[in-house]
């Protein structure tokens, strides 16, 4: 059994997104059916729609920053009831049996997590469709509680941009007194500033753009370093406890590695592509590390949302109607948004 609903998606990599009809499975005993109120626009949505990574199955309906209210629950659901405010992030299922899943790291599932879109539904066998739609059906385990004290439209990007930056800061145990650099000020970087600052760290924005300095300080940065200024960079060599690199494209990591203290780490969360050649001396001379991080497991994502509720953290957003999505995609590619688009889904209903 299935239900037909309205959505926005595309049939080809070079085609605009348009309104279409998709099928959602009827709820099973462990499922939650959600009325989607808001959905964030992630750069990954654009990559997937354009088949930049070569793995898109068309048609595709993007969207993995979802906030909505519970419409219906299956017979075995215990955590949620009709009317609850909930969220869905980048994944909707995993094997639940491997070592990663048992450690609440479903994003690293040995058999592969099931993406909120462009994945394979374990129950129906069909492709998964994302949050650019009126409703979604998700396994209870992958549904998240949203703190009701927050501005819920600005909560949506927390389900991807938020957890992508919170997870490495949390995993590497950033604390008061640490000197943390956030490299790149965009959808990810602006969340990194908010989290690092709220964790008590001395938070430094590292950017190529002087124009972003004022914004960074408003977001909570204690200072700003212009990475194109060699003299300014040299003043900070060997002083950082941790660097969070959110730059989404190929770039030279060598200048940043020189900023790290001995035994410190730079974590990559933005560039899922080859980087410029790295000089091994920048790691060897100081026993430094470069690492990666991918979103977070469901347990940690809930911890992130609870942290946001306690510290009143949300994303800076610009609201759009569903019909404006193609313009929004272009503006994201042009870096013309501060700092995340969110779709008001009532425009599709």
Image: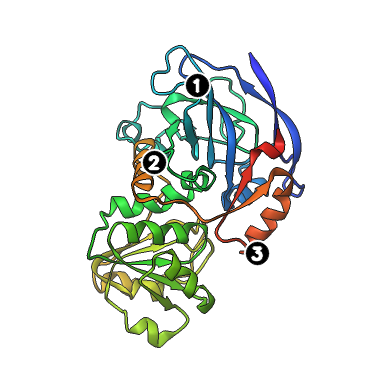
- Residue 198, how many percent across, how many down? 33, 57
Side (left or right) of 252 relative to 347 = left
Q: How is the image coloured?
A: rainbow
Assign a secondary structure to mark 1.
loop
- Residue 97, how many percent across, how many down? 35, 26
Say which label, 3 or 1, has the lower sequence index: 1
Assign a secondary structure to mark 2.
helix
What residue is at 59 percent from the left and 33 percent from the top? 36
User: Can the viewer see residue 58 in this picture?
Assistant: no
User: Can the viewer see residue 139 in this picture?
Assistant: yes
Say which label, 2 or 3, has the lower sequence index: 2
What residue is at 38 percent from the left and 72 percent from the top? 256
What residue is at 40 percent from the left and 62 percent from the top? 193
Side (left or right) of 195 relative to 29 = left
Query: Which image quadrant for residue 242?
Result: bottom left
The answer for how far apart the CA atoms under marks 1 and 2 are is 22 Å
Task: Depth check: give the residue in front, 126 or 111.
Answer: 126
What is the number of callouts on the image? 3
Q: Which residue is mark 2?
A: 301
Side (left or right) of 102 relative to 184 = left
Q: Which residue is mark 1?
A: 82
Q: Which residue is mark 3?
A: 334
- Residue 195, how many percent across, how many down? 37, 56
């Amino acid at each position: 059994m299935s239900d037909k609903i309205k959505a926005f998606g595309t049939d080809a990599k070079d085609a605009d997104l348009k309104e279409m009809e998709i099928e959602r499975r009827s709820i099973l005993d462990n499922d939650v059916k959600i009325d989607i109120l808001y959905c964030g626009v992630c750069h990954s949505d654009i990559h997937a729609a354009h088949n930049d990574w070569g793995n898109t199955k068309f048609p595709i309906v993007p969207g993995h920053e979802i906030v909505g209210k519970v419409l219906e629950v299956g017979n075995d659901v215990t955590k949620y009831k009709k009317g609850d405010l909930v969220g869905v992030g980048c994944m909707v299922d995993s094997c639940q049996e491997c070592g990663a899943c048992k450690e609440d790291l479903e994003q690293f599932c040995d058999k592969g997590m099931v993406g909120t879109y462009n994945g394979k539904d374990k129950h129906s066998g069909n492709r998964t469709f994302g949050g650019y739609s009126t409703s979604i059906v998700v396994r209870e385990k992958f549904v998240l509680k949203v703190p009701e004290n927050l501005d819920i439209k600005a909560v949506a990007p927390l389900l991807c941009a938020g957890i992508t930056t919170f997870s490495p800061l949390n995993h590497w145990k950033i604390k008061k007194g640490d000197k943390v650099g956030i490299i790149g000020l965009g959808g990810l970087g602006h969340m990194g500033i908010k989290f690092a600052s709220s964790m008590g760290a001395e938070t430094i924005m590292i950017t190529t753009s002087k124009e972003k300095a004022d914004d960074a300080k408003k977001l909570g940065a204690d200072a700003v370093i212009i990475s194109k200024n060699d003299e300014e960079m040299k003043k900070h060599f060997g002083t950082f406890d941790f660097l969070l690199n959110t730059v989404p494209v190929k770039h030279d990591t060598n200048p940043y590695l020189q900023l790290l203290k001995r035994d410190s780490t730079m974590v990559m969360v933005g560039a899922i592509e080859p980087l410029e050649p790295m000089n091994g001396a920048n790691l060897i001379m100081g026993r430094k590390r470069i690492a990666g991080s991918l979103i977070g497991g469901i347990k940690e994502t809930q911890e992130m949302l609870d942290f946001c509720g306690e510290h009143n953290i949300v994303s800076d957003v610009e609201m759009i109607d569903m019909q404006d999505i193609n313009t929004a995609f272009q503006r994201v590619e042009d870096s013309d948004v501060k700092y995340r688009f969110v779709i008001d889904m009532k425009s599709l209903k």
